[in-house]
Image (tube, rainbow, N blue to C red):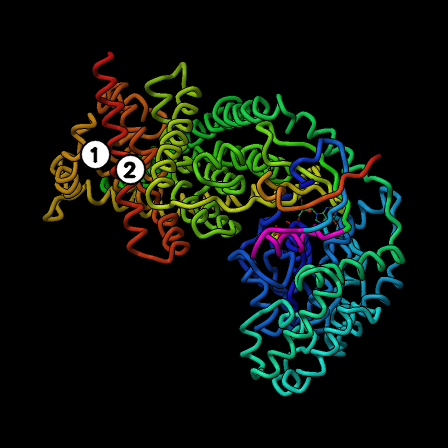
Amino acid sequence: MVFALAGNQNSGKTTLFNALTGSNQHVGNFPGVTVERKSGEVKGKKDCTIVDLPGIYSIRPYTQEEVVSTDFILNEHPDGIINIVDATNIERNLYLTLQLLELKVPTVVALNMMDEVRENGGSVDVEKLSGILGVPVVPIAAAKGEGISELLEVALETANRKALPSVYDFCNDGGPVHRCIHAIVHLIQDHADSLGLPCRFCVTRLIEGDGDMDEKLGINQNEKELIEHCVVEMENSTGLDRNAALADMRYNFIENAVAQAVIKSSESKEHRRSVAIDRILTGKYTAIPVFIFVMFLVFWLTFHAVGQRMSDILATGIEMLTQAADKGLVSYGINPVVRSLIIDGIFAGVGSVLSFLPIVVTLFFFLSILEDTGYMARIAFVMDSLLRKIGLSGRSFVPMLMGFGCSVPAIMATRTLSSDRDRKMTILLTPYMSCSAKIPIYAVFSAAFFPRHAALVMIALYVTGILVGIIAALMFKSTLFRGKPVPFVMELPNYRLPSAKTVALLLWEKAKDFIERAFTIIFLGSMVIWFLQTFDSRLNVVSSSADSLLAIIGRFIAPVFAPLGFNDWRVATSLISGFTAKESVISTLAVLLGTSIDSLGQVLGSLFTPLTAVSFLVFTLLYTPCVAAVAAVRRELDSSLKTLTVVISQCVIAWITALVVYTVGRLLF
Amino acid sequence: MTLDKLKIGKSGKITSVGGEGALRLRFLDMGLIPHTVVRMQKTAPSGDPIQILIRGYELTLRLEEASKIEIEELSE
Ligand SMILES: Nc1nc2c(ncn2[C@@H]2O[C@H](COP(=O)(O)OP(=O)(O)OP(=O)(O)O)[C@@H](O)[C@H]2O)c(=O)[nH]1
Ligand SMILES: [Mg+2]
């Protein structure tokens, strides 16, 4: 049995999905978090699948992620629909409900966020509402786990009985809309029935002027004219055009239902609190300073106060473990080549990356706080006018901000943007937001060459990435992507306290992901690098890695980087290995220099001067995204050629920027 | 007058909803339909976009979009 979870954005679908299935999908206080459909088995029930869908406001989709939802509901025939309604915002949420009821699918309405409604002294007469809507209504609080089992029971029972919604007439007055709908119902009922399509749904689509529906139903010219006649008459007598007339009908029905069944609290505590917080966070004079302060604080805490400290401790631990392992292997008398593989390859490579886990997790922690509290939506609001200058809208800010974590979900998050042009442009810009996998590179280099100003160097790098991104955007805007930015119409949800559980689960997920990569990609990569630098082309162990297989390959490429100040085969290979995952740049250098993370900084002094280090950092900041991100770009742009262009142009831009930095630096110092 | 001209803190009743295509449908879906009361909450620091209160929730839209919505100002 398959249930679809349908509802407005930010109504709590994913929270309910997680509660029902025990999975750990991303939840956030921002409209448009889920962009893909996800199915999961209900815990403790056999053959009962729930499908979490992106949020929609209407059955008519506008953006790519909304198409996913309507497609699923209309074409994949779920056995039942669980319609999540945010009870704190019941009118707008029921608007979608009325459209779902027309589909003739067993439906249950889950009234979510009842905890907030109750706290504020509001209440809902569930029986009455259920009577008005003609489907079961179950009050729940998904985040608190309340009412979930009742909901499941009711949903199963409704689907088993194949109980269809019993109300589908929302124009209970005999007025012009009523006449129009009923006239068209008479006309097409037979067509719809013989095709097994829900008649009411077809009628609304016909009134809205959906050309595909004409064809689907096989409506002839005569019938088409009759329908048009009915619609025009309705328009004339209501004084509203067809779309507004239908919207008006639905909202009238809803207002009536709400008046009967819902006791609203005057103004909710959450809303009052949000307005008060917004006085500062989006205030005329305070918004921008606060935003800059918040971002600065996040980076400072991540790269200095909290994340960095924990990473230092972990690095010491890893170093100790490495030495202990080394001692153990030597005293065991193991073959020196195997010892080298384990210590110089695996321990150096994986260890160099692993120690940065705390920094990465800290950064994700702050990003998730920004999102879960609802501040992310405000950033979009405040930044809209700025982003419009580079041809985008406030919504594009969110994927870009997520890009500081990882480009892959960030690129996927562009699906919530409603125009193709905005989407493509945002996808191209996201890689300029330096992802967290590059943190190990920055951390090692800035600690080695600028120990006193490490945090400052980090922030400067992020800012450089953003600036280059802006320049690129301005170029795109006047060349590839001419045209107007799309409208910006977005809900601003009330601020919420992030739930500790959600945040903890997210961090656990990110930490697991990072560790997994360290022990798969980085592990394998380190072994490959170790192998290539230990043997020559005849598979003899080399005495100096300068004669190794890798050196031959690296020397071939290194000259490309000569103008940037780092003409060394080891540096060149580390950059190439960075394509698999950015952390590999550091693990590769660690393996090639034969040191562990603790002394890597000192050894790097033999390869770089402070200036070439900066040039190298700028290059790594901007050059091609990793394989996973490139694959995501490929998926979203749906073109290999365009993706290749992205990769090449990023490398070129990186090379040029690093050259400028290096040249200017040489002139100055 | 149009929605973008509404002063902060004032309310108005929608008389007609303009705009075209997807934008207009989005307006309707979000509950911006004739006879609905909206309140101007605030503007972003640069004066655009604006934030309005409608049907108990906060919605942001740009001045350009708001100028497509006709309203009738309500006195307190
Ligand atoms: N107070 C309260 N908050 C809830 C409840 N259920 C969900 N939330 C919060 O509502 C917000 C949105 O939850 P999500 O589950 O991400 O919503 P969604 O419907 O999946 O949203 P999209 O994927 O963006 O369409 C989060 O901040 C949740 O913590 C509830 O029962 N009570
Ligand atoms: Mg979701």
**Quarter of the image where the C terminus of chain A is located:** top left
* Label 1 in the same subunit as label 2: yes
Front in this rendered view, residue A641 or A628: A641
What kind of residue is marked 2? Thr
B26 is within the stretch colored magenta = yes
Residue lying farthest to the left in this orientation:
A538
Picture coordinates of residue A79 (x, y %)? 66, 74
Which residue does the image show at 51% across and 43% down from the upper left?
Answer: A510
CB at disc 2 and ligand 2 closer than 8 Å: no
Q: Quadrant of residue A240?
A: bottom right
10 Å crowding of disc 1: few (<14), some (14-19), many (20+): many
- Note whether A595 is above or below A206 in the view shown: above
Picture coordinates of residue A255 (x, y %)? 82, 56
Dots 1 and 2: beta carbons under 8 Å?
yes
Asked if residue B24 lies left or right of residue A84, the reply is left
Question: What range is drawn magenta here?
Answer: B17-34
Picture coordinates of residue A35 (x, y %)? 54, 54
* Residue picked out by circle 2: A588
What kind of residue is marked 1? Arg
C-alpha gap between disc 1 and disc 2 = 8 Å
Q: Quadrant of residue A37?
A: bottom right
* Residue picked out by circle 1: A570
Picture coordinates of residue A376 (x, y %)? 59, 37
Tell which circle, 1 or 2, labels the residue nearer the N-terminal end: 1
Front in this rendered view, residue A552 or A62: A62
**Quarter of the image where the N terminus of chain A is located:** bottom right
Front in this rendered view, residue B50 or A606: B50
B25 is within the stretch colored magenta = yes
Which residue does the image show at 29% across and 45% down from the upper left?
Answer: A647
Disc 2 secondary structure class: helix
